[in-house]
Image: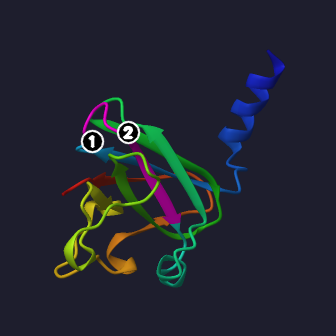
Amino acid sequence: MIAPVTLLALAATGTATAGELRATVRNVKPNQGKVMVALFDSAEAQKAKAPRAGYFAAALGTEVQVVFPDLPAGRYGLIAFQDLDNNGEMATGLFGIPAEPHGFSRSARGSFGPPGFDDYAVAVGASGVATTEILLVE
């Protein structure tokens, strides 16, 4: 009983030193492959294809909840895709256009290509929870 009370006391006093980013991935094709989400902390990291963290889950329903805990304050962007063929890579078609459902945090979309980092970045504070939505599109 002591541990839960202690945790509640710490939460109530605001002593948390890290934030959390939660995303709801929507428009998932149920029971088809898995949903993969990459967390980037800068445009440079995204261009270098060097995510800070990753997450994958079976695509059991039409939505997947993703949580990235213990993040320092900053701006983070999420890129997701549904790996329908379970090969661990996003399938692309002509001119490198994604052939599997994909999306970005804040449900951002680009005009001719992917959106820029500023368009899909989410601010995460030193404590508390930031939320976003990723809408998968084909």
At 48% across and 76% down in the image, what residue appears?
46
Percent position (x, y) of residue 39? 51, 62
Q: Is residue 112 above or below residue 72?
A: below
Percent position (x, y) of residue 25? 33, 47
Residue segment shown in magenta: 28-39
Q: Is residue 38 rendered to the left or right of residue 7? A: left
As rendered, which of 19 and 38 lies closer to the eye?
Answer: 38
Q: Is residue 113 above or below residue 55?
A: below
Residue 32: say if magenta. yes
Q: Residues within 10 Å of mark 2 (few under 14, many from 20)?
A: some
The image quadrant where one finds the N terminus is top right
Percent position (x, y) of residue 45? 54, 78
Tag 1 secondary structure: loop
Q: Is residue 76 above or below residue 100?
A: below
At 52% across and 78% down in the image, what residue appears?
42
State yes or no: discs 2 and 1 in contact (Cβ < 8 Å): yes
As rendered, which of 106 and 33 lies closer to the eye?
Answer: 33
| Residue farthest top in this picture | 1
Residue 136: say if magenta. no
Mark 1 — residue? 28
| Residue farthest right in this picture | 2
Of the residues shown, which amino acid type is indicated by label 1? Answer: Val
Of the residues shown, which amino acid type is indicated by label 2? Answer: Val
At 32% across and 46% down in the image, what residue appears?
84
Mark 2 — residue? 64
- Could you give the CA–CA distance between mark 2 and mark 1, rounded to whole angstroms? 8 Å
Number of marks in the image?
2
Q: Is residue 79 above or below residue 9?
A: below
